[in-house]
Amino acid sequence: MPNAHITGWGMSVPDTILTNDDLSKMVDTNDAWIRERTGIRQRHIVRPGETASSLGLEASFKALEVANLAPTELDLIICSSSSPDYVFPATACLIQDRLGATKAGAFDILAACSGFIFAMNMAAQSIRSGAIKNALVIGTEAMSRYVNWQDRGTCILFGDGAGAFILQASETPGGVISAVMHSDGSGGDLLIIPASGSAMTPTEATVREGRHQIHMDGKEVYRFATKVMASATLEVLKKSNLSLDDIQWIVPHQANYRIIEAAARGLKLPIDRFIINLQDYGNTSTASIPIATVEAVQKGQIKPGNKIVFVGFGGGLTWGALSAEWTGPLTASSAHKIHPERYRVRARLRSIWHRIGRFIEGLIWGRGS
Ligand code: COA
């Protein structure tokens, strides 16, 4: 059975930063409160024109560069997002087109902040079954588009950004070890955008009432999160035949410093075994785990051979954990073959060519007949 190695990683966040002080000019809050209750100091926010797909695309190109893998070699693209560009087409398809990943099947999943773990598990299973060799997994969010900037209970928490991993098949030991996924839809109303789908399509009235924005029961979500972070970590370790002593790092969903502290207490682990960067990005939902991982690799914290548990929770309710041995690129970087700019231009030309082809076909076969 081939192993699913994490061979590439990349992240992208918008340039625009919103600090706690900026927020205190918008709602009745202050820097001290936000820091003390959440640990967050600032978050990155999309500008007009930036979207989940544009952030996801940049993170993907970086991940492909690290893995030294051409977009045309991808078999599968899974994009996890709760703030996709559209209900459909899938954000994964938009990214597939702009990457020029000509042979990849591409689809989105939605499991809120646990989505990246669920998507990684799906991609790893596809590799381990022998069905595919190369997968791109993206977590990307433009959550600020759904934030109610008058609601101090939620607007202080969320930020925008994207992270991406490349998973590749190899017989060498390492890579994804095991995963657990859980859901409890009875808590769906605790974190919800009510007017966002077929249950309640947005209308003038729903917009007036702010139902197209994030609604959250912060206290209930907090209670749920503190319960499941430690339990999911222990569960995936058991399934992996590993103990906490075998693990160098835990990469938790970056929602709130106090939630991570509670998980550390529950696991009887020092807080410095957890990768934490929520102070700079806020809660970027499904993108938070890959963004925290990429930064930790860049800082030299996560190294080849390290065993890691990724653990997350979110709306749905959903929660899960995934264990992996960090390896790195399979191909020597001296054989460097990825030039994002060239792929970007080629993908654009190919996309235009496909559109022209469809137009000509339409003329030949008769439009609307
Ligand atoms: N600034 C200043 N004061 C605020 C505030 C803000 N942004 N938000 C709430 N307050 C006030 C409340 O009105 C309350 O005042 P009161 O005591 O006079 O009534 C007080 O601060 C405490 O509010 P409370 O809601 O109990 O705060 P909390 O400690 O539960 O923290 C959250 C609120 C949202 C930070 C916390 O509940 C949380 O992190 N929940 C989990 C959310 C989450 O992770 N969601 C994403 C899941 S993926």
Image (cartoon, rainbow, N blue to C red):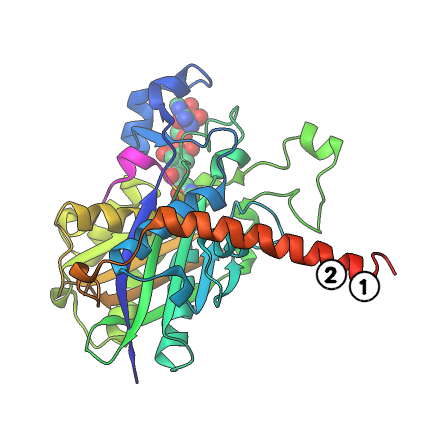
Q: Is residue 277 magenta?
A: yes
Nearer-the-camera pick, 300 or 105: 105
* Residue 51 image offset from top left, x and y in percent: 50, 39
Rendered image quadrant of residue 133:
bottom left
Q: Amino acid at mark 1?
A: Trp
From mark 2 to mark 1, how far is it between C-alphas?
6 Å
Q: Residues within 10 Å of mark 1 (few under 14, many from 20)?
A: few
Q: Quadrant of ligand 1?
A: top left
Task: Find the magenta span and give its range.
Answer: 275-283
Task: Give the residue pinned by disc 1.
Answer: 365
Task: Give the residue pinned by disc 2.
Answer: 361
Q: Residue furthest top?
A: 25
- In the picture shown, does residue 272 fall above or below 354? above
Nearer-the-camera pick, 239 or 327: 327
Rendered image quadrant of residue 302:
bottom left
Q: Quadrant of the C terminus?
A: bottom right
Q: Quadrant of the N terminus?
A: bottom left
Pointers 2 and 1 in contact (C-beta within 8 Å): yes
Residue 262 in view (yes/no): no
Q: Residue at x 41, y 55 (%)?
A: 138
Left or right of 268 in this view: 366: right
Q: Residue at x 25, y 74 (%)?
A: 238
Nearer-the-camera pick, 346 or 254: 346
Q: Residue furthest right?
A: 369
- In the picture shown, does residue 70 fall above or below 277? below
Residue 31 in view (yes/no): yes
Q: Residue at x 27, y 47 (%)?
A: 292
Q: Amino acid at mark 2?
A: Glu
* Residue 185 image offset from top left, x and y in percent: 55, 59
Q: Is residue 43 magenta?
A: no
